[in-house]
Image: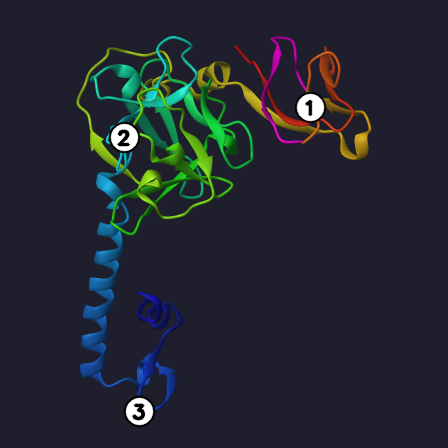
Amino acid sequence: MGHDLEFLIEGTFESPEHHGYVPMDKVNPMNKSTLAIQVTLAIMTTSAGAWAQGGFEGPGRYVITSVRSGKVLDLDRNDRTTVLQFSPRGTNNQAWEIRPARGGYFFIRNMMNGYALTVVEERNGAPLQGTPFNGSEAQMFRLEAGKDGNAVIFSRIGRALDVPGGTSRDGARINVFDPNGDSNQRWVFARTSGDWGRREWDWDEDRRGDRRDEDRREPAVLRCSSDDGQRTFCEADTGRGVRLVRQISGSPCEEGRTWGYDRRGIWVDRGCRGEFAVDRR
């Protein structure tokens, strides 16, 4: 809605007669009425379209289907971490809970175990994984409308969820790739009313509980980086354990060799840079 909203905020109106902007108190009353209607319609259209991508209607539980293959987004029931596509079966590992994150992004958590869709490598073709929820940027996604109105799901680093080569094979892993607008990167969202019982990870329970209980459930995530190959120490309360949740360096992060921890905090060495979850349970 561009200029319509701009003149409302700035208190000016773009006038063809004046070849520019004029103060609102100088605008003809008839023009003011017309402009007010235009702004109202623009705001209504924008609000209605915010959730319009591919059937997405805001936070809730969805089955997510590839436009290209017709297969649904699935978390492998065997290893419980591999993200793949599979023929629809109506099971909980094919349903996803979408909750708001910050900055217009969302967390996408699987209904089988609460694991969050996660980008574990920042490269084209890197496979997605389901990992324990930690609230990091690697678990944040945004939705935008594709050229057919269906949804493109973008990671925080701007790569799109992608069915490799547009294959329709059951079990094909889902990865991230530079956006290309093709149907193998577009998805349809359908709300699901399936009830698979109470889950300890259910955020609805978190909202009703004490925030201190939430802090005990979810781990803290911090970034520790070995810049220029030097050993770096990051203070943290490690009494309940530490785990690497995302490597963000080209150099390997291997526990005991290039990273580790003691009671004072976490150390990294030889170019390892990563995000580490510090358990608080």
Q: Is residue 234 magenta?
A: no
The numbered mark at residue 64 is 2
Residue under pointer 3:
17
Q: Nearer the viewer, mark 1 or mark 3?
A: 1
Q: Bounds of the magenta span?
A: 236-249
Nearer to us in this view, 201 or 36: 201
Side of 64 where 200 appears, left or right = right
Q: Is residue 239 magenta?
A: yes
Above or below: residue 122 compared with residue 19:
above
Q: Is residue 207 visible?
A: no
The numbered mark at residue 88 is none
At label 3, counting other C-alpha atoms closer than 10 Å, the crowd grade (few under 14, some 14-19, many 20 or more) is few
Residue displayed at 23% across by 31% down = 70
Q: Amino acid at mark 2?
A: Ile
Horizontal and vertical percent position of residue 27: 28, 84
Instruction: Kindly report the distance in space between the C-alpha atoms of the residues bearing marks 1 and 3.
Output: 64 Å
At label 2, counting other C-alpha atoms closer than 10 Å, the crowd grade (few under 14, some 14-19, many 20 or more) is many
Side of 64 where 177 appears, left or right = right
Instruction: Kindly report the distance in space between the C-alpha atoms of the residues bearing marks 3 and 2.
Output: 51 Å
Circle 1/circle 2 CB separation < 8 Å: no
The N terminus lies in quadrant: bottom left
Above or below: residue 57 compared with residue 107:
below
Q: Amino acid at mark 1?
A: Pro
Q: Quadrant of residue 5?
A: bottom left
Q: Amino acid at mark 3?
A: Glu
Q: Quadrant of residue 229?
A: top right
At label 1, counting other C-alpha atoms closer than 10 Å, the crowd grade (few under 14, some 14-19, many 20 or more) is some
Q: Secondary structure at mark 1?
A: loop
The numbered mark at residue 252 is 1
Q: Is residue 36 visible?
A: yes
